[in-house]
Amino acid sequence: METADSTRTFVRNVKRVIVKVGTAVVTRTDGRLALGRLGALCEQIQELNSQGYEVILVTSGAVGVGRQRLRYRKLLNSSFLDLQKPQSELDGKACAAVGQNGLMALYDSLFSQLDMTSAQLLVTDNDFRDPDFRRQLNDTVNSLLSLKVIPIFNENDAISTRKAPYEDPSGIFWDNDSLAALLALELKADLLVLLSDVEGLYSGPPRNPDSKLIHTYIKERHETVITFGDKSRVGRGGMTAKVKAAMYAAYAGIPVVITSGFAVDNIIKVLHGECIGTLFHRDANKWASTGEIGAREMAVAARECSRRLQALSSQERSKMLQDIANALEANEKAILAENEADVVAAQQAGYEKSLIYRLALKPRKISNLANSVRVLANMDEPIGRILKRTEVADGFILEKSSSPLGVLLIIFESRPDALVQIASLAVRSGNGLLLKGGKEAKRSNAILHKVITSAIPGTVGERLIGLVTSREEIPELLKHDDVIDLVIPRGSNKLVSQIKASTKIPVLGHADGICHVYVDKSADMDMAKRVVVDAKTDYPAARNAMETLLVHKDLAENGGLNDLIVELQTKGVSLYGGPKASSLLKIPEARTFHHEYGSLACTVEVVEDVYAAIDHIHQHGSAHTDSIITKDQEVAEIFLRQVDSAAVFHNASTRFSDGFRFGLGAEVGISTSRIHARGPVGVEGLLTTRWLARGTGQIVDGDKAVVYTHKDLSGLEIA
């Protein structure tokens, strides 16, 4: 089965492209030419032409332009008496003749401004019945393209022999959409792009908020469920005509993309392989379980399975986790083999060492992961816990209880062990789950997902946990706030920022792990050396590793700073200084204090006191984890109370900021946001609350029929 990635790989071999632009794109709503859109279109074609693509343009709009011009001429030549009479519709052939002249003059002017030449080719339906015409057409177009000239085709409506050229569905072609498809076959194009006034083909009317953009059209799935609206507001086709033309070309072996002509760079995006618009491809049926609709169905299936999971007893859910732990250990060899293949591929691709370090599953890692799953299996039942019980009125009891969030979308990079932690937390908390890992861990994620889902009983369904395999599916999934309840990105600052900017779904996560250790003047230096070295070297690629060491100024004078520096350098840590430290220690100056090395490197700076350290952390940190080393309890309390980070430690390594080490069993990530969950997010962070009321027939009746008691019954057993 191909993945959704395959649906856009066809662009690798594209050289000859036919672009069809519709009347709704060429003209504005008042009938005048849309100069800005046409200018952007010509600029895209010029750029593609300079990149070596052969671009052929099929344009509509002549009739619309001509009608607008002739109406104006008719108005000028009409008397007041003429205007009082019923106005007859203008002759379409005359409109076409006038409009074609103006339309081509504009194209010629726009291309000339870009130092390009265009050529006009007007054709009719009957022309294609002549084999000699077809041969000559190919020769002419090939000659023009060899000279970097842009051939511009249009149906010659002015002399069309069809009796009803705007309605007649017979013949070799019947509008410019079908003409474009015919030319794609005749001229052996590699791709056909149909530009419309909407983003592509939708599951319903594009203005309906429930309608979803279909990225890959699958005839077997969509043909009977999609209803088309009215035809184009000005042209003769509309989406129905585009789909028919697209199907005709696609089944003949030419990929087709329907996308918006209102965007300034959509043609270039298509040729760069970006997942925009709707793709028609003769192999689309092979991708039936992937792509946009498959991803949405995955989310819906995860929700349905999560409800079946929640219906199980606590013992049954616990057994599921025990089965997952056993399956991981039973398949250790297969998992490690796939992981090794990922590591080798990453090394050959030249990935950074820090990423490869996170990617590799170390010895005994599978056993450790299995044990962490068992810890979750043995923890107290988190679902349905009564958090508060209140007697609202006599015989009317209200309970606030813990409840699963619903469906989680977790996007993570590099670390395949995160998949196990996240999946087991989802099962323990009763949530459905969609997982999207980095491509560098593709094999590892696939085998881990297979092992885990194989341990899920049929009464729940293995689709409880879905593995999203294509990056192209993420933008569309982020639109589905009706079926996905929380997004948790685990990765780079760039990844988290992109996710937050791309969705209405709540996002829980952190952008950076700029963690500090501040060594105060009263610190036990032996302790300080141990903590600082551990915070930096235990796992340098981790988000909770120390990235900045802050040292009290007195330690720079009494030798304590030098002792810390020597200790770090002995462990192979590269040091960069702030303005003060770089001058004192003769080390390179750091480019910025807000930098996450993710490797054996860190920044060092000297500060005046604890207050200066706190100010530095607030200005340059990421509110992840920060620690103070001091024997002065008063100073320690100041630091603990005033540092506004998700985790703040005294005399301990920042590496303790971890769900497993906190006793949460595992973590789905660390949150630096201040809403919902903060710090390491375990099972409790994946739960929300709901209210259960048990009454005896109470009614409100304007609050006259009830006597409120609001008595707190928390901790009391209710018979």
Image: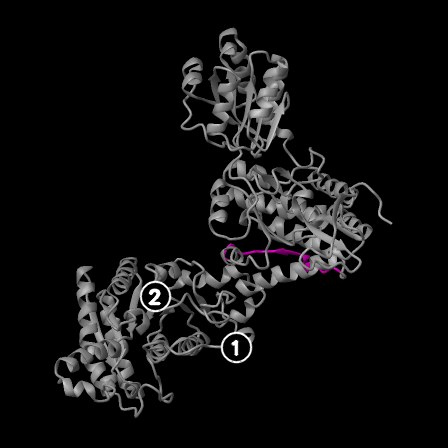
Residue lying furthest bottom: 163
Expressed as whole percent of the image width and height from the top left, the position of residue 463 reads 67, 59
- Residue shown at 78%/60% (left/top)? 697
- Residue shown at 16%/80% (left/top)? 75
Quadrant in the rendering for residue 10: bottom left
**Which residue occupies the foreground of this view, 79 or 441?**
79
Quadrant containing the N terminus in the rendered view: bottom right
Residue lying furthest top: 558
- Residue shown at 49%/47% (left/top)? 500
Expressed as whole percent of the image width and height from the top left, the position of residue 310 reads 74, 55
Label placed on residue 679: none
The residue that disc 2 covers is: 261
**Identity of the amino acid at label 2?**
Gly
Q: Earlier in the sequence, mark 2 or mark 1?
A: 1
**In the depicted structure, whether residue 183 falls above or below residue 710:** below
Expressed as whole percent of the image width and height from the top left, the position of residue 66 reads 21, 78
**Which residue occupies the foreground of this view, 573 or 215?**
215
For label 1, the SS is: loop
**Which residue occupies the foreground of this view, 682 or 208?**
208
Residue lying furthest right: 719
For label 2, the SS is: loop
**In the depicted structure, whether residue 325 falls above or below residue 299:** above
688 left or right, relative to 357:
right
Expressed as whole percent of the image width and height from the top left, the position of residue 492 reads 50, 41
Answer whether residue 195 is visible to the viewer in this image: yes
Label placed on residue 223: 1
Quadrant in the rendering for residue 94: bottom left
Answer whether residue 22 is visible to the viewer in this image: no
Q: Residues within 10 Å of mark 2 (few under 14, many from 20)?
A: many
**Identity of the amino acid at label 1?**
Glu
Magenta part of the protein: which range? 460-472
